[in-house]
Image (tube, rainbow, N blue to C red):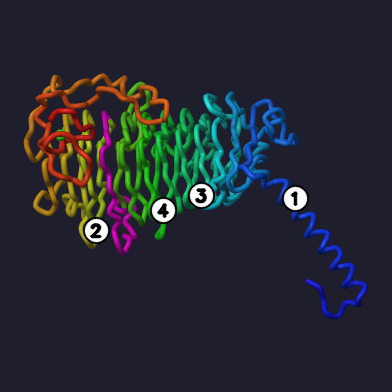
Amino acid sequence: MIEISETASNSTRHIMKYRRFFLTGLLALTLVTPLSAGTLHVATTGNDKNPGTLALPFATIQRSENSAGPGDTVFIHGGTYKMPATQITAQRRDRAEVTVLSKSGMPGKPICYFAAPGEIPLFDFSDVKPPDHRVTAFSIDASWLHLKGLSVTGVQVTITSHTQSICFDNEGNNNIYEQLQMHDGQAIGFWLGKGSNNLIVNCDSYRNYDYTSENKKGGNVDGFGFHAPKGSVGNIFRGCRAWFNSDDGFDLINTIEPILIENCWSFYNGFDPSFKGLGDGNGFKLGGYGVSGGPVPEVVPRHVIRLSLAVRNRSAGFYANHQPGGIDMLNNTAYLNSVNFNLLGRDASHTTDVPGYGHKLKNNLAYKGRTEVSNMNAAACELAANSFDLKLQFEDKDFLGLNQADLVAPRQANGDLPLVPFMKLRPGNPAVNKGVDAGLPFKGKAPDLGAFESEER
Ligand code: CA
Ligand code: CA
């Protein structure tokens, strides 16, 4: 701003300076905003003093963020990025945040951080061990970002009291997280702590186990967590898998707002890979507030989970976790969990556990749980065409496949879940065409039960 009291010559100098600044700014804008969206490159052979071209790539995603703008794509090339502690970008409270993405894209012009086509960039955080700090490998405050194809491994826990480290921590809006792999670390895979309209799609979180903090039981490490405050709406987990996470596969314990989970598979959680029991071990922990004793939100979030699969989790496949209200569970399949569907609720005063009420359960299939369904107040739920209320009896031969190796089969080329026969209904299975309309597409004369609609007419 030019002060009125300035002399004329001072003003002129200021104006000249501002004009020069303005023109320089315009020139810079022209240079960094080409007609087509810009492309930048990050590689293990890169250097942050480079210009970020294919020939002269950056070394870090953090550096690429400075140069990227809305509509740009940063290609991250394959290989192992051994992250040093010197790459910690921010220390906030007790968190050491390594890569921090705080620059947003725009509607229709996201900033994309993509694995270079056909390449697998693996970020190894095993050397990042800040004393007395939680580690957040990727901290995303920004909005309108699209991350795709990145793998994160080896994230550490250094604190021995109650704590948690996180691979991806989202606090922005309108972000897409696609084909991310979070594995073999001590951290939670994906944490949605805040934000709206985020899509987490086709991501895998597996073999994550905190063997450092508290009692070394890994009681806090989930594959995917949604724990958002009021106003964090429109979020979706789709096509994601979670297995051998030391606590739960998916956990919604502390969220005030509802979420949609669909086409997700959760198995072997609460175990280490030798099936030694560790933490809670629910496939999908869909409710909350009971454990901490409140406070209960004014409106209890009504989550929707559909077309999802829970197998051989240490506790429940699908667990209402003391939710003082209902959840929509539609066309899910549960197999070999300790309890396939545990609907445990809390009364309205939130003091006493009661059989779950207010749930809408349609077309769910339960097979070979030690218990198929528990803690259900059937009269206070909307039940239709679940295998446990139809009292359907299955045998192994009713399914096209029960080979658990299928669960970890490689994904399809586009990142979708593998096409495998596991738990699909063989023609003649008593669940074929026994379902009711649950608002989901179906084949034949009626919906089937479970997560996989058969071709049978
Ligand atoms: Ca948990
Ligand atoms: Ca059908």
Residue 68 magenta-highlighted: no
User: Residue 327, position in %: x, y?
Assistant: 24, 50
First in residue order: circle 1 vs circle 4: 1
3D distance between C-alphas at marks 3 and 4: 25 Å
Q: Residues within 10 Å of mark 4 (few under 14, many from 20)?
A: many
Mark closer to the observer (4, 2)? 4
3D distance between C-alphas at marks 1 and 3: 23 Å
Q: Do callouts 4 and 2 mark residues in contact (Cβ within 8 Å)?
A: no
Tell me the residue that label 1 is attached to. 28
First in residue order: circle 1 vs circle 3: 1
Tell me the residue that label 2 is attached to. 351
Identify the disc placed on residue 108. 3
3D distance between C-alphas at marks 4 and 2: 23 Å
Q: Amino acid at mark 3?
A: Gly
**Position above or below: 40 against 345:** above
Q: Amino acid at mark 2?
A: Thr
Q: Amino acid at mark 1?
A: Ala
Which residues lie in the magenta part? 289-312
Residue 301 magenta-highlighted: yes
Tell me the residue that label 4 is attached to. 228
First in residue order: circle 3 vs circle 4: 3
Q: Residues within 10 Å of mark 2 (few under 14, many from 20)?
A: few
Count of labels in the image = 4
Q: Do callouts 3 and 2 mark residues in contact (Cβ within 8 Å)?
A: no
Q: Do callouts 1 and 4 mark residues in contact (Cβ within 8 Å)?
A: no
Mark closer to the observer (1, 4)? 1
Mark closer to the observer (3, 4)? 3
At horizontal 27% and vertical 44% (from top left) the residue drawn is 305
Please, what secondary structure does the residue beneath circle 1 have? helix
Image quadrant, ligand 2: top left
184 left or right of 292?
right
User: Residue 386, position in %: x, y?
Assistant: 13, 40
